[in-house]
Image (cartoon, helix red, strand yellow):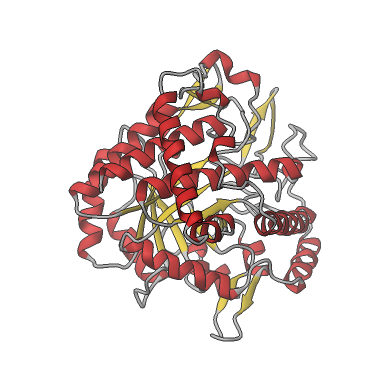
Amino acid sequence: MENIKKKKMIQQPKYRNQAALNEILREISLLPPLVFPGEIAKLRLQLCDAEKGGRFILQGGDCAERFIDCRESTILNKLKILLQMSVVLTYGAKKPVIKLGRIAGQYSKPRSNDYENIDGKEIPVYRGDSINGYEADILKRDPDPARLLEAFYRSAVTLNYLRSAISGGFADLHHPDNWSLDSFRETESWGKYSGIIERIKDSLEFMESIGGVMRDSVGSTDFFISHEGLQLDYETAVSRINTETGNYYNSSAHMLWIGERTRFLDSAHVDYFSKIENPVGIKFSSKADVNELLEIIRILNPENEKGKIVLIHRFGVSEISKLEDYISIIRRSKFNLSWCSDPMHGNIKNADGIKTRDFSDILSELKSAFEIHSKSKSILSGVHFELTGDEVTECIGGTSDIGHADLSQKYETYCDPRLNYSQSMEMAFLISQMLSSKK
């Protein structure tokens, strides 16, 4: 793994005390893994099904997790929204949904600049709780290697609670009438949504009545975790040897992704991802050079194995029409991969100095993505959202009718705005209808 440092490394924090960093990384490298190789292999098998349209991927969670959110209610709300969305999508797609949380490790974020100006003072930019503090204080913004160990422990606690909640029967999905949908009940769309809920409920009850098939598959479910593999010192420290294969795997997540800012040839990030068994997401926008993208796919998956690569396009509603050319060229290369739409990142705007996203833009990009893949005879295998199970006010629009003036009411994200519970569920219903229409 040391060879990755011979490649170009960007988006890495600059630590003052290298000896302290090395000691923290050594300690992390000796801790038990968070995930087991067999779990990674299971996800890859499911992604093989997604490539040919047999499953649908739902990936979602925080833009950047915060240490203060490592709390019972916050974790359960994130799990609840992803489980409930998956049931709605399963109903529409008539196929199993791969539940992939941006959770238990999404503690760092790439940034456009190394510094920002606050009150006339230039201080290091906030890079996520695993790197430095959010407070606008030059000392707290100094990268602290102890935060890497804190991120590991909080990831372990979060993952343990997720697994316990699922095995313990949290969020019983056999009773969707108990879902928290109060914000929909006074809208014009309620009749449409409530009809879907009743049909889901009837389907679950019917399956249970003939032998409990659905109770086993919905009441106890697979749940995988993912994060952006950004801080390479940390990712290297959590890498382990799979004793069965002799290859490396990242032991802190089932799947990782490489972002738009670190996805380039001769990148240390690309080199690292090429050495691990985990499935890898590759995010790209309309700015990506398609030939470079093709070469990166070859580097990451030289044997063209199935279940290894998930291409996540994040074009924005104004650029999504360009996706068709990428699909055409990439499909001619006959790579085994899944396509996933991230309709959040290309649709960020500022309102009175507050960063937000418009629900209608997100939905419009997603609709266009489905149409373009259908036209190109390609399979859109999944969606990727930044969302939360809480009723925050960070994105405008949706049936909750959040306006620009409402953003300050409960704006909690440290980075990019997220869909709240109501907006996420509404999006799930709308995607379900898109999937149903393709049957």
Going by the image, does 322 lie left or right of 188? left
- Count of numbered labels shown in the rendering: 0
Examine the image and state in which quarter residue 329 appears. Answer: bottom left
Going by the image, does 170 lie left or right of 358? right
Residue 78: image x %, image y %? 62, 43
Residue appearing at x 37%, y 33% in the figure: 363
Examine the image and state in which quarter residue 122 appears. Answer: top right
Residue 181: image x %, image y %? 55, 29
Q: Nearer the viewer, residue 240 or 59?
A: 59
Residue appearing at x 51%, y 22% in the figure: 185
Asked if residue 142 is positioned above or below residue 31 in the image, the reply reads above
Residue 357 can be seen, yes or no? yes
Q: Nearer the viewer, residue 217 or 119?
A: 217
Going by the image, does 304 lie left or right of 398? left
Q: Nearer the viewer, residue 202 or 398?
A: 202
Q: Which quarter of the rendering shows the N terminus?
A: bottom right
